[in-house]
Structures are given as structure tokens and as C-alpha cells.
Image: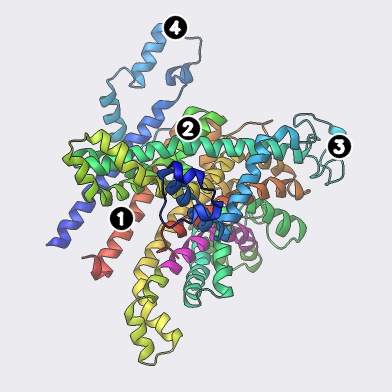
Amino acid sequence: MADNISRPVSLSAWLSAPVPTSSWQARAQQLWLSWRALRSNPSVMFGGTVILAVAVIAIFAPLFATHDIYAQDLSIRLQKPSIAHWLGTDELGRDVYSRLVFGARITLTIAGLTAIIAAPLGLLVGTTAGYVGGWIDTILMRIVDVFLAFPSLILALAFVAALGPGIDNAIIAISLAAWPPIARLARAETLSIRKSDYIAAVQLQKASSFRIIFGHVMPMCISSVVVRVTLNMASIILTAAGLGFLGLGAQPPSPEWGAMLSSAREFVLTNGTIAAIPGTAILVVSLAFNLLGDGLRDMLDPRHG
Amino acid sequence: MTLSLAFGRTLLSVAATLLGLAALTFFIGRLLPLDPVIAVLGPNTTHEAYMAMAKQLGLDQPLWKQFATYLGHLLQFDFGSALTTGKPVAGDIARVFPATLELASVAIVIGTGLGIPAGVFSAMYRGSALDHIVRFVGLLGYSTPHFWLGLMGLALFYATLGLVGGPGRIDVMYELDLEPRTGFYLVDAALTGDGALFKDVFSHIVLPASILGFGAITYISRMTRSFMIEQLSQEYVVTARVKGLSWARTVWVHAFRNVVVQVITVVVLSYAFLLEGAVLTETVFAWPGFGRYLTNALLAGDMNAVVGCTILIGVIFVGLNLVCDLLYRVFDPRTR
């Protein structure tokens, strides 16, 4: 070890050394290889860059916004894009660009929170069902089937109707509709993993099912779950926008993109731009997630061409 | 023997799913933060009146008994009365459903007619410009909020260009001319033999159906493409080519025949997804169908109607899945 540190080597030589001398170097090499694979995949790079850019805009929204997003000025309502208002103004004279910037926050929050709720839930249910098997598997998968019997928007709508409109309830509703496909995927992965030799080895050491599921099965499922969740992000964003549009998600005056579309709807026949802008934003972000997810899937599973 | 056994198993699992569906909707109905008794009687009520109403609504019963009652009602297609219309939900749905069915049927014709060829050609000329265009349009279709597309379509084709009819199924001036016989306005208008009437009805349905159909095109073409690619990598394709068959003949006559059943199941499933898309599309186009009924019920907090619609969609989904399953079993010997 000391020998290795004392000898200065170039970073690229260190990263491409045929035999890593420390576990840390091995890990760094692996990361480097994945980064190179990612870099050579245009759809991953494009999708990733767009998402990163939107995330930066969302985090630093107050710096990017040019106007107060709630300040109304009826004397300048429904204006076309200009120097003062880059994307024009809405029906209450609010700056559309600034609202769009703050709307990115809401969209990414919904997508992020949904992923944080739905992915672990799906992973837990799927791996447990797949590993434990028997009647637990039957019951859990039956529940998943019931959830999958509804299109996700319809299920989310029904939950929102029961919970009441609002952004928090929308997140809960979308999460409740989003976990079952992940559970099914994780179960399928688990079924192929549980027969492998390393699981048999841990079983022989008398590891508990709990330990095997959390320590040895779940980590193997994570990559495919991440891909699945990335692809689902697009439909989550569309569902959230749809809920906002119907007036069941984020409520006005919130600058959520779907809610912006909802209020733009009345003016769409006279002023198309005002509806074009939030819709394009939704399209770009969900396209970016789809590209990223597609690219990641192609890398992990070349069978899907 | 094995076939009938497998069929019995499928039916059993469908029954279990339907039971689960009932349980889930029952649960959703109970999630309501609002006390159903207070919803009926208002907040200023005596204890006696409250208890009497709770008894009348069956809320004094144990939960399993309430669920049994609920199931019993479901089996008789009794979803209760809608608060918004005051009529039974089942009757309301039956009234609005033809509008949605008509929209979805036109959309599926568009989706199938364009989606299947797009998918096959895309796989046939894999890596070509055509393939890239089909894939990119498919990706766009997956990423576009279709209700927004509807808004933009209205702004462009109706308000600006005046090419299509506006929101609704028919112009007010024609409304009295149309005698609803089948509930499908296109058919009804054709039956009257009035050309202008048919043209009006057609101009109203073409935009929403195209936008719904666009969603179906993306799904159908994507799935068709991947089925075809799988087939085209098989050895029999090489054999056919070596034998001297043209590429087009190999693709359409040999490979495509092997994916027909899979493609049909995809079409059937996308029919189900059109119902989902219809909710938002109908709202945009003021289409007096199932989706708009559901949306209005949602906004009014009318749980009987919401639960009724949700169950119906679930049952349709399960039913169409069953149809796909049976199609596979009957027409695809590989699954036996």
C-alpha cells in the first residue's frame, strides 16, 4: 500500500491499471468504466444533461426567476413574450418564465418523492415475495395484480378523490399507483437470484431470510429497479401534470405546470402561446427521463434493442 | 385436459383479482376523510338522527358485513346514486359510455392502421432513417402530455385554421337533426343519410380520436417493432433468405405471421389504455363521455360515481387481459 502511494502515477494509468492494488482503486476503476460507457451513450448523456440542468434551475429557482411569481398586474395580462417578460404573462399578468422556473421545483419534487416512496416499497414487496415464496408470495402478488388491474392515472385519480385534492395527496396517490410494477420486476429478478450459488452459500452460513433479502438480494435488484424508476419518472410527471390540469393536484396559484395549463385552457383558443409553454416544459423533462431510462436499460440489458 | 385445467386456473385467478378489486375500491370509498353521515345530514345534527342515519347507511354493521353488502350490490351492478345527477351511477355510465366507446374505437383504428406498419417497417429496415424516425416519434408519444396536445390541436386546427369542429360531439345547430339510435354518432349520422350532418360529426371526432390514437400508435409500433426484431433474428429467417425469398416476403409472410397473436394482444391492451387517455382527452374536448363523467364526479367529490367508474375500468382491464390470455392459448401452440 505504502509503496503504491509513494510512487506517483498518472490518474489515467491508475484508473486503467490491469490489476488494482486496493479495493478503493478497484471501485474507482469500476466507476470510471461505467462513466465511460455512459459517456458514449448519447441518449443517456442528453437525458442526463437536461435533467441535471432542470435540477439546477429548480434548486436555484430564486436566482433564475426574474419576477415575483405571485405578483399580479392586470394591466399587462396575456402579453406575448418580450424583453421584460421573456415568455410573456399569464391571465393575471404574472411572469410566465418565472412561474415556469419555480414549477420545475414542484415537478421534480413530485417525481423525486414518488420515487423515494414507490421504489423502496416495490423493492421490499417484490424481493420478499420472490425470496420467501409460498403463500406470502401468492398474497403479495395477488395484491400487486389488483393494483395493476387499473391504469395508473385512474388509480391515482380514485385515491386523490378519496384523500382530497392537493399536492401532498397527489404524491401519495401517484406513489400508491407506481409501486406495483416495481414490485413485479423486483420479484422476477429475485426469482432468478435466489437459485444462485452465492445465495446458497449465505444460506449455509445460516443467515436469516431478513439478512439475505436486505443484504444479498436487494442490492442485486437495484440496478434494474433504478432503470425502471427512471422510465417511470416520465409517466409520473405526466400523471402529476394531468392531476394538476384536472384541478386535483397542485392548486392555484401554485406554478405547477399542469395547473398552469389548466388555467391557460380558457385562453387557448385566443392565445396559443400561453398553453404551449408549460406543455413544452413537461414534454422536455419527461422526454429527458425517457431517454435516460432507455439508454440505461440498453446498457444494462442489451437484449432490448 | 391440461388446457381446460389451465383455463380453470385462469378463471380462478381472475375471480380472485376481481374480489381484490372490490376490496380495493371498498377501501378507497372508506378513505374519505369526510364522515358519510355528516355528508348526508350536514354538521348540525342531533345524536339520535346521526345514529339513525348511520344505521340506515349500514355503518353500524361490522366491517366485513359492510363489505359483504357492498359486494352484493356490485354483483347487481348497483353502485348507488350519483350525488351530481341524482340518478343511479350504473345508468349514468351506460348513458355516457357509447361516446367514449366511439372515440376509442376510431382511435384504435388509427392506432392499429399506422402503428403496426410503422413497427414492422421499423424492424424491417432497422437502423435506417425510417427506423430512427419511428423510434423518435414513439419516444415523443411516450413523453407528451396528451391533454396538452389536445389543447394545442384545438388552438391550431380549430381556432386558427378552422379545419376541424370544436369541442363536443356535434354542433348545436345539428343537435336536433340527429336521432340517437346506436349512441355512436358516426353511425347515427350515416343512418340519416345527411351528408352535412355526417361531415359535422366527423369533424368533431377526428381531432380527439387522432390524439388518443397517437398514444396507441406509439405503444403498438414500439411493441410490434420489438416482436419483429426478435423474430427476424431467428434462423428460419436466414433459411428463407437463403432459399431466395425477397426481404419483404420474408418479413411479411414468414416473420409477421408469427407475431400476429402478440400484436393482437397489444392492440387489445391498448384499447384498455385508451380508456385512461380518454379521461383527460374528453375533459379537453368537452366530450360527453365516460372520462368527463368521471372527472366531474372527482371534482364534486361524488364517491359513488368515482368508485363505480373505477370498478368498471378495472373490470374492463381484467376482462381484456383475460381475452389476451385466451387468444394466446388458443392461437399460439407454443404456450401450451
Which tag is nearer the camera, tag 3 or tag 1? 3
Tags 4 and 3 touching, CB below 8 Å: no
* Residues flagged by tags 2 and 3 on a common chain: yes
Residue most toward the bottom?
A: B244
Residue kind at label 1, given as amino acid type: Leu
Label 2 vs label 3: CA separation?
38 Å
- Residue at screen point 81% across, 44% down: A86
- Residue at screen point 17% across, 36% down: A206
Disc 1 packing (10 Å; few <14; some 14–19; many ≥20) = some
Tags 3 and 1 touching, CB below 8 Å: no
Which tag is nearer the camera, tag 4 or tag 1? 1
Q: Give the range drawn in magenta.
A: B200-226
Counting residues from the start of the chain, the first of labels 2 and 3 encountered is: 3
Q: Mark 1 lies on which chain?
A: B
Q: Which of B141 and A233 is in front in this view?
A: A233
- Where is mark 3, residue-wise? A76
- Where is mark 1, residue-wise? B322
Judged from the image, the secondary structure of the residue bearing numbered disc 4 is loop
| B3 sits to left or right of A303 | left
Query: Which mark, by number, is residue B85?
Result: none
Label 4 vs label 1: CA separation?
50 Å
User: Which of the 4 quarters of the picture holds residue A208?
Assistant: top left
Question: In which quadrant is the C terminus of chain B drawn?
Answer: bottom left
Residue A45 spot, x, y in % from top left: 58, 55
Label 3 vs label 1: CA separation?
57 Å
